[in-house]
Image (cartoon, rainbow, N blue to C red):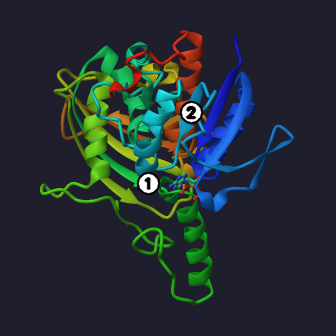
Amino acid sequence: MSKVNVAILGATGAVGKELLALLAERRFPLKELKLLASPRSAGNKIVFNNQQITVEAVSDRSFENIDLVLASAGGATSRTWAKKAVASGAVVIDNSSAFRMDDNVPLIVPEINPEAAAAHQGIIANPNCTTILMGVAIYPLHQVQPIKRVVVATYQSASGAGARAMEEAQTQARDILDGKPPQAEVLPYPIAFNLFPHNSPLNDDGYCEEEIKMVNETRKIFNAPELRVTATCVRVPILRAHSEAINLEFEQPFAVAKAREIIAAAPGVKLVEDWQSNYFPMPMDATGQDPVLVGRIRQDISHNCGLELWLCGDQIRKGAALNAIQIAELLLDKNLLTPPSSAVSV
Ligand code: A2P
């Protein structure tokens, strides 16, 4: 496999750090590695594979000779830099929501729709974390019998709001235990010993942006524009793994034993069920793990064509960095790491 010049945009963030760990762990064929962030971090040193790399502030010249950009620095930063990177000859795998619903941008979960990568025009979007975790768990069932409707409630960790939110959650916990009032600056309200509906902007129907991402992105990834999805997204006092309670409705009854068999054999997921001891997926067990843990698969007693399940997945890993690296590996494997000449038309 030929070696690749890679830039990480947002290298100092929670996802950026995990991207670095995964590049090393999975022995990604790197030629050069450039670490980019905001001017705040310029000059900082990060150790990668026993070598110190100096973080650079992203600039117009950052993408010269770069083959692949892994971007995880927020939507505004991606909107500023992604097309410039493509114009310089790089392919961008973008973890932000900036381009996800663009018709010219594939939105990929490698276990679900790897074939979509072939149509890329320079930018490939990494889906929203809750969408990825739900997608890998329910797509294997959808392939056997199309899902008609999904009702999901999420329990989302502080990591979804970045490294500063994780630090804030820990500081708040210490302050509360010390009898001091918790300060909230990154998230709108204290998250330690508390929870609140997801803090993304609300639309006129009363849904927040995160919930609408789950609806639209799942439809795009599954190539199922008619799929009915409704979501309630909640932030909970957990550091880095998300959980989801999912209700699925099918046309016909779906045998629980069959669903369990399918989940146990599916890529990217692990069946975790011990009914004797009431042991099922927990965020603590999912933290640092690649697979999405799935369990409590049971018949919906209110609907004979319904199934209930529960999952936990590492938001920073499969929910973000791991999925991005898997997309990069897919591009290498299929020889797709070349932006077409019409690359900047997105
Ligand atoms: P920096 O550390 O210099 O602020 P997280 O999601 O964990 O908060 O991380 C966000 C990442 O995006 C960080 O690496 C951060 O860099 C980077 N970032 C934020 N704003 C910009 C920007 N305007 N230009 C480049 N990188 C940015």
Q: Judge the density around disc 2: few (<14), some (14-19), many (≥20) Cα neighbours within 10 Å.
A: many
SS label for mark 2: strand
Looking at the image, do the residues carrying marks 1 and 2 touch, with CB atoms under 8 Å apart? no
The x and y percentages for residue 69 are 56, 33
Residue at point 45%, 75% (across, down): 190
- For badge 2, the amino acid type reads Val
SS label for mark 1: strand
Vertical placement of residue 92 versus 72, above or below: above
On the question of residue 85 being in view, the answer is yes
Residue under label 2: 69
Q: Is mark 1 within 8 Å of ligand 1?
A: no
Residue that lies at the very extreme toward the front in this rendered image: 61
Residue at point 45%, 48% (across, down): 243
Using the rendered view, name the quadrant where residue 68 is placed: top right
Left or right: residue 34 compared with residue 303: right
Q: Earlier in the sequence, mark 1 or mark 2?
A: 2
Residue under label 1: 156
The CA span between labels 1 and 2 is 27 Å
Using the rendered view, name the quadrant where residue 167 is placed: bottom right
The x and y percentages for residue 327 are 52, 24
| Quadrant in which ligand 1 is drawn | bottom right
